[in-house]
Image (spheres, grey):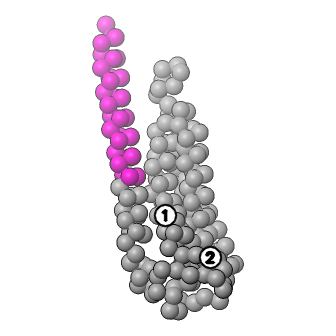
C-alpha cells in the first residue's frame, strides 16, 4: 500500500529493464573477454581460456546484477511487486556468473596476467566440476526461489487481510 492506502500497481517496465540489463551485460562481458585475448584456446592443459572468459563475464554480470538490485530497491515502495520480482530474478540471473568470478578470484592468482597467472585447476574437467562453483549456483537458485515464495506468500496474506478489512468496514 502506498500513502493514500491504495495498492502499488505498475512498474512492469522494471522486469523489462532487468531482461535488457541481462542481455546487455552478457554481450558486454563476452565482448570484453574477447578483447582481452591472451592467445588462450580451448583444449590447453590449464583451461585459461574458460577461466578468463568466465572471470570477466562474471565481473560484468555482477555489476549488471547489482545495478538491477539497486534499481529494484529504489522503486520498492512505488512498485513493490515488480521491484521484488526484479530483485529476486537478479539474484538468479546474475548471481551465478558473479559467483563463478568470485570462486575464480579465490582459486586463482593474477587471472588477467599472461605471465603470472596461476590456478588450482589443472584441467577443464576439474574447473567445470569444482564443487564450490556448483554449491554457489544451487544456493543462489534456492535463495531466489525462496525470496519469490516469501514475497508471494506475503502478498497473499496482504490480500486476505485487505479483504477481511473490507468486509468488516462495509455495512
Q: Is residue 79 above or below residue 124?
A: above
Considering the whole magenta stretch, tell me its main secondary structure.
helix
Q: Which residue is mark 2?
A: 110
Picture quarter with the C terminus: top left
Q: Is residue 78 above or below residue 60?
A: above
Nearest the viewer among 32 and 167 is: 32
Q: Is residue 156 magenta?
A: yes
Q: Is residue 14 above or below residue 33?
A: above
Q: Which mark is residue 158?
A: none
Q: Which residues are magenta?
A: 143-171
CA separation in Å, label 2 and label 1: 18 Å
Q: Is residue 169 magenta?
A: yes
Number of the front mark, 2 or 1: 2
Q: Which residue is mark 1?
A: 99
List x then y, in percent, for residue 61. 57, 63
Q: Sequence-wise, which precedes: disc 2 or disc 1?
A: 1
Residue at 51% over, 42% down = 83
Amino acid at each position: 500500500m502506498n500513502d493514500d492506502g491504495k495498492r502499488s500497481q505498475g512498474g512492469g517496465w522494471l522486469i523489462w529493464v532487468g531482461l535488457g540489463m541481462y542481455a546487455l551485460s552478457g554481450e558486454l562481458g563476452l565482448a570484453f573477454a574477447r578483447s582481452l585475448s591472451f592467445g588462450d584456446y580451448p583444449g590447453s592443459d590449464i583451461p585459461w581460456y574458460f577461466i578468463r572468459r568466465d572471470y570477466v563475464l562474471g565481473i560484468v554480470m555482477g555489476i549488471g546484477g547489482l545495478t538491477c538490485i539497486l534499481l529494484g530497491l529504489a522503486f520498492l515502495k512505488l512498485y513493490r511487486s515488480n521491484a521484488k520480482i526484479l530483485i529476486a530474478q537478479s539474484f538468479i540471473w546474475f548471481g551465478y556468473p558473479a559467483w563463478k568470478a568470485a570462486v575464480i578470484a579465490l582459486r586463482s592468482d593474477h587471472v588477467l596476467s599472461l605471465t603470472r597467472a596461476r590456478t588450482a585447476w589443472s584441467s577443464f574437467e576439474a574447473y567445470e566440476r569444482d564443487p564450490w562453483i556448483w554449491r554457489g549456483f544451487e544456493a543462489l537458485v534456492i535463495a531466489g526461489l525462496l525470496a519469490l515464495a516469501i514475497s508471494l506468500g506475503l502478498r497473499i496474506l496482504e490480500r486476505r487481510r485487505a479483504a477481511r478489512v473490507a468486509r468488516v468496514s462495509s455495512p
